[in-house]
Image (cartoon, rainbow, N blue to C red):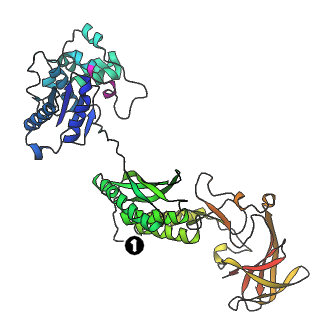
Amino acid sequence: MFAALCVEDRSSIEALVAIARDFTPRWERRGPSAVALDLAGLERLFGHPRAIADELRRAAGEQGVRASVAMAGTCTAAHLLAICRQRAVGSRRHEHPVVIAPGGEASALAPLPIDLLAVLPPRLLAPLPPCPRAPLPPPISTFHRWGLRTLGALAALPADAVAARLGAEGVRWQRLARGEDLRPLTPEAPEERFEQAIDLDWPIEGLEPLSFVLGRLLEPLAAHLERRGRGAAAVRLQLQLVTRTVHERSLQLPAPMRDVRALRTLLLLDLESHPPGAGIDRVVVAVDPTPARVLQFSLLTRPLPSPERLSMLIARLSALMGEGRCGSPAVVDTWQPGAFAVRPFAPRDHEPQSHRDTEKTLNRLCDSVSLWPVAGKEAADLPAVALRRFRVPIPARVRVEGDRPVSVTTYRRELPGGSVRQCAGPWRTSGAWWLGDSRAQLPTPNSTTPNLEVGVLGVGSSSWDRDEWDVALGDGSTCRLVRDRAAGAWCVEGIYD
């Protein structure tokens, strides 16, 4: 069931909005003088529809508003009946609400004048999705030339004949005359500010007294978010200092959360890296709300840590290692060996695949790989060789004869060494010499991705000039040697398995 409240004085629309909010969160403005309500579920509170209509009329009387009340199975029918009730002559037009049982909308609207269509807002004519152009006003003059005076006369016309003369808009106006809804009711969400502030009697310095203030502000915010079914997508902190300056910090959260302890810990860890420069007079905490997350655990996969615990861990590591030094590795668009980038750590939930999908994926990958013949044999018949790179290259002493390495010595006993039996190389690579030693000039995986920290493993600058050798040593191991041509230094970059 739907209800519509209509007033003659447009200045009373705010009172109607207040009444609608008290009854249900599903309400919508219908023009400058009417409000529509979705009454689904209110029967358990007030009883039958007539009791709900009387309660609406009583609430309007307590607000000092003379409003007409109508109820029907569709929102359009209730709106038209409320408008007709408002235009009724006499002082008793507001005393008795109109209640139409579902299914009787067309017969109830049939005797009403066709001029009521001109009062409906034009946006009610647009279906979902909206039309590319604005809807046209109702052709009342055309209806009058056809001899139509009531909504029932328009509803009784053949739909094909109306479409042939007026197009799709004419059919939509005919559906409105029958009391049909062209689109669902769109609830208007009130603008809410999720913000808490406190003025301190005495300035505070240090994070320990500030933590108590933050807990006092975050508790009502978390309760407000829980009542609205929301979570915090971002937290904004404003600290007004005794120097009349404002210290602002903003945290983007990886998932919607409303845990007070987690939010307070994240703010304190961020302030450890970015402390305010003076005493604090006023504290303001605001959050950007977003729909709360719904967790659905699986019996077949291991659940990930909660976003609250994961965010606290990342924040503690960032405070310990430094900003931009903790995250996920990312591929850098460069030929420089060992180059990498660090982006914010944001794991995604694992979506298990069926065995059939996994088999199809493996078959597609195998089909996309072409096996080229090598020395008369297929590549699949050759043993697989993998280079196990060291996270940081190991310095080494290499003796060279005739520009070729002949012996390798390292300072770590677990690493191979000794005379060189066979060697292949050198493979010379160089690049980024035009950038000098500016590490910030390295390209990133995505220029639009924020908070990326670019670095190079085991390399002191962004430019490189080196020779690579694959050597087989006397102890049976094979390793990759690298010589920095600028410094003349050797290192072991990895071992072949």
Residue 492: which quarter of the image?
A: bottom right
Instruction: Judge left or right: residue 458 versus residue 21.
Output: right
Residue 260 locus on image (x, y percent) = 36, 63
Compare residues 430 and 323 and report the one nearer the observer: 323
Q: Quadrant of the N terminus?
A: top left
Instruction: Name the amino acid type tagged 1.
Output: Arg
Instruction: State the residue at coordinates (65%, 65%).
Output: 340
Compare residues 243 and 79 and report the one nearer the observer: 243
| Residue at the front extreme of this rendering | 202
* Range of magenta residues: 119-129
Residue position for label 1? 302
* Residue 126 is inside the magenta segment: yes
- Please say if 56 is above or below 436: above
Residue 356 locus on image (x, y percent) = 42, 65
Q: Quadrant of the C terminus?
A: bottom right
Residue 53: which quarter of the image?
A: top left
- Please say if 295 is above or below 34: below
